[in-house]
Image (cartoon, rainbow, N blue to C red):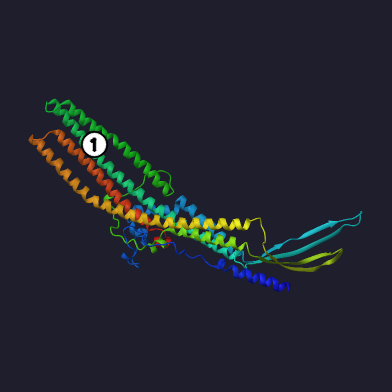
């Protein structure tokens, strides 16, 4: 009769706990369409090669930059920490898997006793005990699944750090080249203005201009000279930043020229569904939701009985009140079922908390998806904007170079003032600096788009 009651309790519990055995599946309310603003999912073939799937060596071809990225992937401090976090998650998963196996313990005991000055009696036990909880209601199963999801989340975080390292090194490298170009332009302009000041002074002595024009030329020359230390300081600090990214103390960084850089000019971003497998932050957010889902199942498992089998076997010389020698074999086995009835609301509170955390993880996943789509469209727009401005800046620089040349010719003919020559040269300097800054924006937007699409996340791709 008692066995029948236990079987009925277990059967009822099993029927009511079917949900706790289900593996995580993405909720239907989480949609992946319309993530790209102004782009429909069916406008891009799903089997197309995504820009984010290209190996980073095909995106960044400068040999000096390649060596820096290789060193960064091997020596970057944040990436090393992320790798160690993955190892810790693997150890946690191993512990969750071993929870299926029974636990064994050796617990030897010895006693010395004497009563009323009688001879000392020696008793001992050498037992090996074992305990095994039968995972009838999925507690161990969900613990293992949660550990697996946590490992995937940690690995996704490592991939995200790797993407940031590659993108950070590339952006900082391009920043250095932009600063180098700005420094060359500024120094070249300073030399021109130095000669201009000398010319203005000679003209003042010849009575061809006034002191105000000379002072204005000197002020412009001084402002250009003052800009050079600022650029040199920026170069110094940017080199230190790049050195830290590759695990080095601050030092000079070998680099190429801005004009030599070749970056992709056409991109396939792919459909939003592909983003789920490319973006490490999206993967991490989904695995966080999976962990929360399994933690909710673990909280549900607390409402169901736990069945534990335990036993021990060994030798002892204590047979009740009698001491025998040699020792005799002793064995025992126990089976227990524990059904929670009332735990001061702790189980209910734990389940409510787990459900709330699962809902939070779901909202964070949706937010991460939308943010990912915004980053992709933002990077694309930034690239298209910089590309559209590039032609305008090129024409502006060409026009200003001709303007400076023509103004000088007119001045030599006596039909223009030297102030007009100075103004034209000042405008040319601004145009050249703006052109360099826009070229850098174009390069930076390519890097940002590559990062937004999850580019550089896989070590296997780096070796291709």
Q: Residue at x 36, y 46 (%)?
A: 253
Which SS class for mark 1?
helix
Q: Position of residue 294 (x, y in %)?
A: 54, 62
Q: Quadrant of residue 125?
A: bottom right
Residue 239 located left or right of residue 151: left
Q: Quadrant of residue 36?
A: bottom left
Residue 457 located left or right of residue 379: right
Q: Position of residue 203 (x, y in %)?
A: 13, 29
Q: Residue at x 28, y 43 (%)?
A: 182
Q: Position of residue 127 (x, y in %)?
A: 75, 64
Residue 270 located left or right of residue 423: right
Q: Quadrant of residue 305?
A: bottom right
User: Residue 62: in sight, yes or no?
Assistant: no
Q: Quadrant of the C terminus?
A: bottom left
Q: Quadrant of the N terminus?
A: bottom right
State how many labels appear: 1
Q: Is residue 146 above or below residue 218?
A: below
User: Residue 354: in sight, yes or no?
Assistant: yes
Q: Position of residue 219 (x, y in %)?
A: 24, 30
Residue 424 located left or right of residue 351: left
Q: How many residues crowd around disc 1 within 10 Å: few (fewer than 14), some, or many (20 or more)?
A: many
Seen from the viewer's position, the closer of residues 385 and 355 is 355
Q: Residue at x 15, y 36 (%)?
A: 421
Seen from the viewer's position, the closer of residues 167 and 364 is 364
**Residue at which label 1 appears:** 190
């Amino acid at each position: 009769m008692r066995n029948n009651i236990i079987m009925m309790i277990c059967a009822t519990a099993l029927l009511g706990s079917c949900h706790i055995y289900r593996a995580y599946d993405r909720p239907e309310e989480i949609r992946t369409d319309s993530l790209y603003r102004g782009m429909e999912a069916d406008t891009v073939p799903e089997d197309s090669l995504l820009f984010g799937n290209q190996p980073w060596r095909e995106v960044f071809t400068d040999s000096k930059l390649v060596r820096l990225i290789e060193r960064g992937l091997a020596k970057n401090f944040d990436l090393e920490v992320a790798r160690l976090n993955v190892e810790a998650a693997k150890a946690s998963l191993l512990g969750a898997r071993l929870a299926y196996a029974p636990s064994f313990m050796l617990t030897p005991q010895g006693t010395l006793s004497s009563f009323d000055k009688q001879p000392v009696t020696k008793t001992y036990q050498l037992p090996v005990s074992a305990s095994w909880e039968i995972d009838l209601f999925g507690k161990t199963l969900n613990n293992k699944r949660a550990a697996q999801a946590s490992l995937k989340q940690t690995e996704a975080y490592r991939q995200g750090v790797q993407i940031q390292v590659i993108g950070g090194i590339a952006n900082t490298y391009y920043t250095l080249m932009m600063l180098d170009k700005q420094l060359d332009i500024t120094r070249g302009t300073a030399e021109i203005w130095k000669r201009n000041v000398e010319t203005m002074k000679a003209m003042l002595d010849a009575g061809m201009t006034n002191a105000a024009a000379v002072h204005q030329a000197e002020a412009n020359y001084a402002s250009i000279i003052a800009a050079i230390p600022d650029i040199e300081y920026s170069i110094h600090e940017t080199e230190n930043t790049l050195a830290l990214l590759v695990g080095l103390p601050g030092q000079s960084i070998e680099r190429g020229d801005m004009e030599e850089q070749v970056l992709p000019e056409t991109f396939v971003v792919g459909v939003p569904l592909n983003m789920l497998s490319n973006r490490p932050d999206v993967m991490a957010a989904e695995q966080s939701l999976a962990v929360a889902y399994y933690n909710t199942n673990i909280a549900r498992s607390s409402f169901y009985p736990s069945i534990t089998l335990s036993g021990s076997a060994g030798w002892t010389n204590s047979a009740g009140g009698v001491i025998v020698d040699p020792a005799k074999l002793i064995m025992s086995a126990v089976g227990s079922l524990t059904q929670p009835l009332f735990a001061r609301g702790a189980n209910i509170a734990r389940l409510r908390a787990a459900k709330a955390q699962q809902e939070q993880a779901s909202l964070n996943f949706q937010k991460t998806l939308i943010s990912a789509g915004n980053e992709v469209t933002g990077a694309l727009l930034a690239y298209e904007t910089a590309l559209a401005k590039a032609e305008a800046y090129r024409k502006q620089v060409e026009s200003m170079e001709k303007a400076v040349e023509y103004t000088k010719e007119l001045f030599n003919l006596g039909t223009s003032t030297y102030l007009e020559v100075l103004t034209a040269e000042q405008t040319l300097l601004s145009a050249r600096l703006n052109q360099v800054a826009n070229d850098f924006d174009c390069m930076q937007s390519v890097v940002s788009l590559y990062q937004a699409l999850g580019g550089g996340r896989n070590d296997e791709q780096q070796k291709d």
